[in-house]
Image (spheres, grey):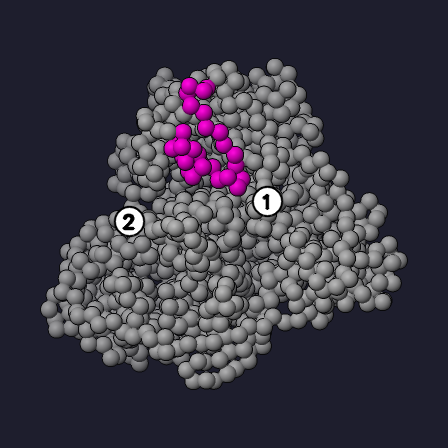
Amino acid sequence: MKANVNVLVLTGYGLNCDHETAHTFELAGGVPSRVHINSIIDESISLDAFQILVFGGGFSWGDDHGAGVVQAVRMKTNIGEKIIDFINKGNLVIGICNGFQTLVNLGLLPGFDHDYATRSVALTYNDCGNFRNQWVNMRVNPKSPCIFTKGIHTIELPVRHGEGKFFADEKTLLRLQENNQIVLQYATRDNQPANKAFPDNPNGSVLDIAGICDPTGRVFGLMPHPEAYHHPTNHPDWTRLKEISRRNQKPWPPETTMGLALFQNAVNFFS
Amino acid sequence: MPNQLEITLNPDLADAEGQKIRQKAKNYFGFELTSVRTIHVITIDAHLTQEQLAAIRSEVFTNPVTQISSYSPLPVDFDWTIWVGYRPGVKDNPGSTAVEAIEDQLGIELAPNEAVYTSKRYCIKAENLTYADVDKIAGELLANDIIQQWRVISVQEWDKLIGTGIIIPSVKLDYIPAVTTIPIDSDQTLQKISAERNLALNPNDIPTIRSYFLDPDVSAGRAEVGLSDPTDIELEYISQARSDHCNHNTFRGCFHYSDRTTGEKEVINNLFKTCIEAPTLTLKEKKPWVVSVLWDNAGAGRFDSDHYYVITGETHNSPSNMEAYGGAITGIVGVYRDPLGTGIGSKLIMGSYGYCVGHRDYQGELKPHLHPRRLLDGVIEGVKDGGNKSGIPTTFGQVLFHDGYMGKCLVFVTALGIMPAKVKGMPAEQKKTSPGELIIMCGGRVGKDGIHGVTASSETFSANTPAGHVQIGDPYTQKKMHDFLLEARDEGLISFITDNGGGGLSSSVGESAEYAGGCQVQLEKVPLKYEGLNQWEIWISESQERMTVAVKPEHLDRFMALSYKHAVESTVIGSYTDSGKLHITYNDKTCAYINLNLMSSGFPQWQFDAEWISPETRGLTEPVIGEPRDYTALLLDILGRPNICSREWITRQYDHEVQGTSVIKPLVGAERDMNSDASVIRPVLTSEKGLAFAQSLLPAYSAIDAYHMTSCTIDEAVRRLVSVGADPDQIGGVDNFCWPDIQFHPKKNPDGKFKAAQLVRSCKALKETCLSYGIPLLSGKDSMYVDGHLTGPYGETRKVSGLPTMQFSATSIVPDVQHCVTMDAKIPGDLIYIVGVTKNELGASEYYEHLGYTGSHVPHILPEQFFPVYKTLNQAIAQNIVASAHGIYRGGLGVHLAMIAMGGNLGMEIDLFQVPSDGVNRNDTLLFSESGGRFIVTIDPSHQETFEKMFLDFPCAMIGKVTDTGNLVIHGMDARQILSASVQDLKAAWKRPFGDLI
């Protein structure tokens, strides 16, 4: 019998995408548990039992002092070492939206030279000056070591954030490029680089960066929400796509979705 | 020694917030600002060492990549700087989370008298601004003086070392709380005291209240616990329970209705019972899916055999009118507690909004407290923060501009939740309290928030008086509580749950005690935000984010352990009894002792005179308009009208996809920018079933007859649901009435009788239309007094009343979400059908309004004719033979053909001669009449025969084809081409008013 791939989805303190994230991992073949941050801190639940750790979307601590900042403080001061151990054991970590913001504030990303403590990139206020919910097209870097995006070339997902503008200094950006740590970049509807143009690049991220990974490819952070595209009817054009498929005698609905595919890659990594 | 940390973005990073302020200063006041930089200020009133201060600065409050910070004023360049902070007692949410972060980082706990406050400093570079200009920016753009204070400092006055100075907005009430007794020697005395203390007792209630306290049996019982005359807390309790807000005295009133033209008279005793309760109970008998209605915080319908959905709607008009952001966020976060307090607790699954405000570009001579543009900006932002931070998708919303709402804006907020049908084998929609169970208050603490609502705004402020009446919802605290309570529910720990909203503990404990038959509350146990609250203030405070829960003593330990895990404060404040009394003590001394059945005994019913004056008697006639020659220009102009045009900027600010349930989004179409008829979610992720939701608002028709306003509004909501594929036989409704004052007064409200008659007619239409369509009213609310007195150019005040408005929310089941359709044309060559009859019904239409008329031919709804058509369309959609479906709503056929073309980014060729009509002989009537019961449907030509067969017995005709030309082309009744516009031009016109807003 194949061993379970156990997925820990963090909850509590204003996090809010835990149900659909757990559901999507279940569809992907994982065994998800929704676990309150405090249950790890008080050791009633141990990270040792898990292979995938998910920092999900939401508004932890209301995002009051910069998105993900207070969550990172709490995690670092209480279980910082345990998380680094978890990574070093070869496990996977994904940070989605608020989780990505937390990963960069923890310093788990970009994780140059196994330094999982230094903050060297930031996710700051959108250039458009507001929270925004829209779908984006992204190009996947085929040379990236990222486990989650293996075999995927382009991807469509929704963004829902007010602080998603990726920012770093030139030196850091160069290093990210050299290491192929830039995993996802915003693109136009026909998958050309967005070149910072709004709304294809919804937040003004430098180099159109939507997601990065650490040098091992096992720690991955992205602003868009893969868990919000786990069902064909999540796609904004699905009624149109359905009609076109039917007229062309093509099957509807499709068997999988892009969001689900990311999570399947993660689960399959362990099998 | 307090310390003040200033944080700002690196100088080379764009400051999006500052940029927005710059733009607004230009748009609102015409000020040209060179630059605006924002500085976040954290004032730490706690004993921390230099090392500790350094640690929290670098590890918590400063991002090394994007920010700089300092404990002395940052040297950001400016000509003027404006500091804006909260007034004492106003909820400072970031201040609270800052405390959590500091405690985590340093591993310490702050002392009770230590605190952290947040504020902002804006650095403005601008030439030629005066102090008065900058003060205007501060007072009218950056701050609201009800909740905030500010200082304006010029560069010349600026002291580089001291900066703004340190302002600690802590609440200091040098006051020993006390219970006072109130003499009741005469009705006059009590009336006088009621007025002095803002008790707002109704004069007609006063004899009943006095006779209760003078009753010898009551007096004897009170003497035993040491009471004689009523205490302030007792009268406050009675006042809250008898308020129109809690008791719905208007809707339960007796209406003496007469028709001035016919002389007919009628007495309607209790609009709620006759027009809402009776039809709903009748329908509940016929519709087994109706689970729970008319008693709980929200109504419940069956989603599937294992789940019930719950729904309720609220308004938060007066608070939003005073403080748009605070009012709106409190409104949305508040309505989200209703499903949480329904049954033994429901998980929140979606929300929606409806805003009625003055025109955004209003330039008239009246001066509302907040200009409509600023008010709308604040309301949008409040619902954004409240909804998004709650993790609940906002999937639907409407905005309506009319200057009548400048007297008072309307802010509708609606909430849906879902509960398991059973928890631990017990029905989850049922609940009760029992003697011996503990009363637990969960969530936030109690302050002076919301006491006596807006009456407090007239009190003078001092530096340390709390801005009591204004509340700012805290979605973060509530989200933690939501997660905690659902976990407690699933473990079977909750016997009863309800929220603390209007009336605070007074309502939640008072009402929940009725099930057990009594309660005993130890008021000193209630956790407070600050000391110095009177007992009556603790009892009626409307401090937010609180739920009242009944827990059996044997479950207490587990309940408190879960509460601790979720970082939620929960406190036992008393217990339920069977004493028949509401018994409140403070440090063992009784301060209230009232028979629980007092509220259900002998209070007089409110009386209203209602006089209907028919449109004819009022002199309304159809206008005399010759047929237009330039239909293209006319259509483009109507598409750009504020109530028709795109408001994408609002929709995109609201997270409508969180929870992963999204099926039909608020924006659809090839370019994902058209308004969907309804939204659909899949609230149970493992199920293919959907829940459709739509709302409608058509107050313009009230100018002719509120009866037809109401029936048209309901019909529109029904068609919206049918258009996406929802089942017409499982529609549940929610009525939200917002009406001007209906109590006649010769001077203050001379047309009160007419407004009362409009309300009666509206309620009759509600009853008749819901019975005909088979819509039980799962929930509903009313908010009266939509009036304001605005100052004019000569210092005079003018009463401005809102249109009689009823928002109707409707929800239904979609058996399989894969069958849903959207409104956008899909593929060139598809056939376009119109379903339903177009009549000469231009009265109060968008077309007439555009030309400056009202008219008299308001649309009439004929449910018996319409409903079979809706059922047939539903079957066609379920059989996958419909490519797109869209109702014809405000603006009529012309506007909605344009919407479908824009949705598909495709052309259409239309022949008006084919449109089924009745008594219409003009193109403008066909294009702009707002007759109900109509849809536009596009289909694959291969389905033509099947589709036409299904609609054989109904008014339905093919009126054209979808084309790949990119042009909407319309031929008139005489076959001549009367309109041609490219989809790009249509869209440009439709997006022109607000297209630049983000």
- The numbered mark, 2 or 1, whose residue comes first in the sequence reads 1
User: Residue A76: percent from the left, percent from the top?
Assistant: 58, 25
Is residue B135 within the magenta segment?
A: yes
Measure how far apart labels 2 and 1 are at the Cα level: 40 Å
Q: Nearer the viewer, residue B269 or B368?
A: B368
The residue located at (35%, 18%) in the rendering is: A170
Write down the residue under mark 1: B459
Question: As shown in the figure, which amino acid type bears the numbered disc 2?
Answer: Pro
Question: As shown in the figure, which amino acid type bears the numbered disc 1?
Answer: Glu
Residue B841 location, quadrant: bottom left
Q: Nearer the viewer, residue B629 or A49?
A: B629
Is residue B95 within the magenta segment?
A: no
Q: Are marks 2 and 1 on the same chain?
A: yes
User: Residue B383: percent from the left, percent from the top?
Assistant: 47, 47
In the image, residue B139 above or below residue B877: above
Highlighted magenta segment, given as a residue range: B131-158
